[in-house]
Amino acid sequence: MKKAKYNDKHLVIDILAESFDANLSVNYIIKQDRKREKRIRALMDYSFEICTAFGDVFISDDNKACALIVYPDKKKVTLKSTVLDAKLILQAVGLGNISKTLKREKLIGSIQPKIPMTHLWFIGVDPVAQGRGIGSTLLQEIIEYSNSNNRPIYLETSTVKNLPWYKEFGFEVYNEQDLSYHLYFFKRDVK
């Protein structure tokens, strides 16, 4: 695994936009219109920028998978983050989805513990390369990286088929919420 550079941004957006095209959680906040795919790309652009500023972006050695990590204890409101938030609303969420998006983010924030952690925001594999162990290798490297930094890992997923995968890597469900879809909250303590 390697840390992404800024010129890797388009690769990361491509992988995540394709990986999360049908994701329930992503499509919950994205305005559902003829620009939906473009809006998902805008969400991934936003996420890349936030993780570059307040976390890490990793790419697998073969450039087929990536992970976006944010460290909530390092996240702060800046002029840049405020501009990014406004751009997210206009280009991805849409004015009509602001309320439910804010409610969801507030809910997630209220459930996550207020401790130094690795928040695994997105992990995705190019759909053509899925099923080859690339994502598993990347996740294992993220676990090792987080352990070396003495940070537990927290994440949320709405993808039911990924539940056993996370459990294989020592993650456990610590909360579940029903929105218009089911959202699972996972954690993995430092070992």
Image: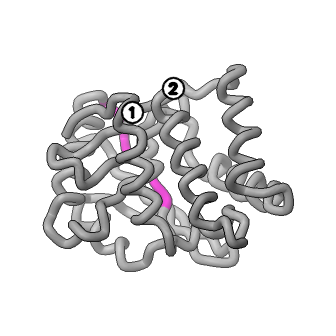
Rendered residue at 16%/54% (across/down) = 137
- The chosen color scheme is one colour
Across the whole image, how many numbered discs are drawn on residues?
A: 2
Relative to 42, say whether 78 is above or below: above
Residue 131: x %, y % from top left = 19, 72
Of residues 140 and 174, the one drawn nearer to the viewer in this rendering: 140
Q: Is residue 113 visible?
A: yes
Q: Is residue 101 left or right of residue 124?
A: right
Residue 154 magenta = yes
Rendered residue at 59%/50% (across/down) = 42
Element under disc 1: strand
Q: Is residue 154 visible?
A: no
User: What residue range appears in magenta?
Assistant: 150-156
Neighbour class for label 2 at 10 Å: few (<14), some, many (≥20)?
some
| Viewport quadrant of the N terminus | top left
Res 122 label:
none
> Which residue is disc 1 drawn over?
56
Of residues 14 and 83, the one drawn nearer to the viewer in this rendering: 14
> Which residue is disc 2 drawn over?
53
Q: Is residue 10 left or right of residue 182?
A: left
Q: Quadrant of residue 146?
A: top left
At label 2, the amino acid type is Ala
Are the residues flagged by discs 1 and 2 in contact, CB closer than 8 Å? no
Relative to 120, say whether 173 is above or below: below
Relative to 163, say whether 147 is above or below: above
Rendered residue at 63%/58% (across/down) = 39
For this orientation, the residue located farthest to the top is 79
Residue 69: x %, y % from top left = 42, 40
Element under disc 2: helix
Q: CA distance from mark 1 to mark 2?
A: 8 Å
Relative to 132, say whether 9 is above or below: above
Residue 55 magenta = no
